[in-house]
Amino acid sequence: MTDIRVPALGESVTEATLASWSKQAGDAVKTDEIVCELETDKVSVEVPSPATGVISEILVAAGESVEVNALLATVSEADASEVSAQSAASEGEQPGGDLRSGPEAAAEAIDVVVPALGESVTEAVISAWNVQAGDRVSANHTLCELETDKVALEVNSPASGIVSRVLAEAGTTVAPGDRIAEIRSGPDDGGTLEPDSAQDAPSARRLMEEHGIDRSDVQGSGRDGRVMKPDVLGAIDKRRDTETPKPDRATGIGEADVAAILTSQSPLPDLPRDPAIVDDAAREERVRMTRLRMTIARRLKDAQNTAAILTTWNELDMTSVMEMRAEFKDLFQKKHGVKLGFMSFFTKACCIALKEIPEINAEIDGEDLVFRNYVNMGIAVGTPAGLVVPVIRNADALDFAGIEVRLAELGERAREGRLAIADLQGGTFTISNGGVYGSLMSSPILNPPQSGILGMHKIQERPIVYKGEITARPMMYLALSYDHRIVDGKGAVTFLVRVKEILEDPRRLLMDL
């Protein structure tokens, strides 16, 4: 028996996410044949088999986080001839190399199963099917879309062929490994398999049908211009804003009518109905909450019910950060290929402060306190589908360019609805920037089980006393919400003051002060 373990991932990289398995338990493998792929914050790593044999057990599911040297799977060793025979049989060949013939070779039944959904995610709902029984599909053609508590996932065809059966209808709750369809693969029956075109997401097409949205009115943000669910939600909001009925007061009751009514002794006359006064039900729209929205509501309420949330504020003079950004943003983009934003400054400052006040980067687990010697920074992002918090893993080990590159990647995937489960897991602290929407001050809610969240707000010039004189400076209110069960007031205030000190004099970032 030979172990397959996580290889060394590079300097300062201690963990990775298992992106996908190319082999399953029972499959034959040869030495150095790729069995799975790992993703770190920097690169993708292919893991080869250390021996020839058969995969006897897979111990880590796709989407889970693993550390260096963690056990991934085991291989039962076998000689090359046995492995070749098993591989040939699985590919429809006799051990001697002759192709099998007859109905068994003509059409092979391949199951379509629910993929791994990520750590702690045990079920999903089939939101829509893109095909039906009898449809011919090519390999990697999108068959259906699943919705979990966190993200929407597309299920692709494992092979070219015909959809022989659909085993779970739209709206069905399914678990990882459940069979949901069957593909009959085999020689072409005279038809031509067309390549998978850039089709809109099933959930997006359903929403467009339900709300009468024309496809040409929606700008697709997905791959090759595919329309995703958030795109349609944005189009619905835009149409609702433009179609809000405006009251026509011209046919309503005028001042003369009111005076006549007040002085008249006769019964009230039949007056024209104000078109603005209509049946409330006719002006309402009932839409079922998505699983993402239900999860957001549940988690935020759980945070209020469980944690002892307290917020402390301070104000930050943004002059130095703004001057440094203005001076170096062009050179930064030319060298690193990404814009220099404010979020990298705040991320670096928070990483330093979290190491000095470690309880804000910790969490309560039962009767234990779990302290972390790393920072996985969650960045709250508002999308048409709802609030998501993608995570920059090991943010404390990244430089400005590394943070900005990762931010750009996660932001693009969030807007397109392409965030993976691994992108949302493992956060230890969160930054939320309400200032991009114009918020001057707010009290952010914790993202459980985290113990702290920093709220950034609008930069606004305000008169302050600076070096003995009243002058206008670009100021920002900062808010730190924290769990008072684990973080004392002194630690929270010290943390916020430390962030303020670093950002008001960014040279401290270079001097590690």
Image: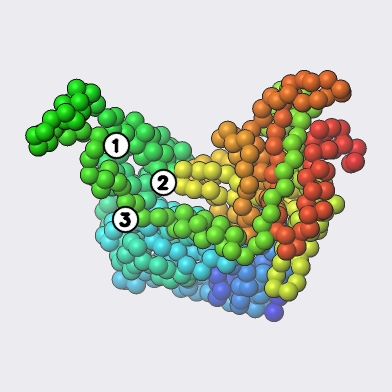
Residue 262 horizontal side relative to residue 182, left or right: left
- Marks 2 & 3, CB-CB < 8 Å contact: no
Q: Residue at x 63, y 39 (%)?
A: 441
Q: Secondary structure at mark 1?
A: loop
Disc 1 and disc 2: Cα gap in Å?
14 Å
Mark 1 = which residue?
214
**Crowd band around label 2 with a 10 angstrom C-alpha radius: few (<14), some (14–19), many (20+):** many
Mark 2 = which residue?
229
**Dot 1 amino acid type:** Asp
**Dot 2 amino acid type:** Lys
> In the picture, residue 406 is in which quadrant?
top right
Q: Position of residue 140 (x, y in %)?
A: 44, 53
Residue 98 horizontal side relative to residue 510, left or right: left
Disc 3 and disc 1: Cα gap in Å?
21 Å
Q: Position of residue 135 (x, y in %)?
A: 28, 56
> In the picture, residue 505 is in which quadrant?
top right
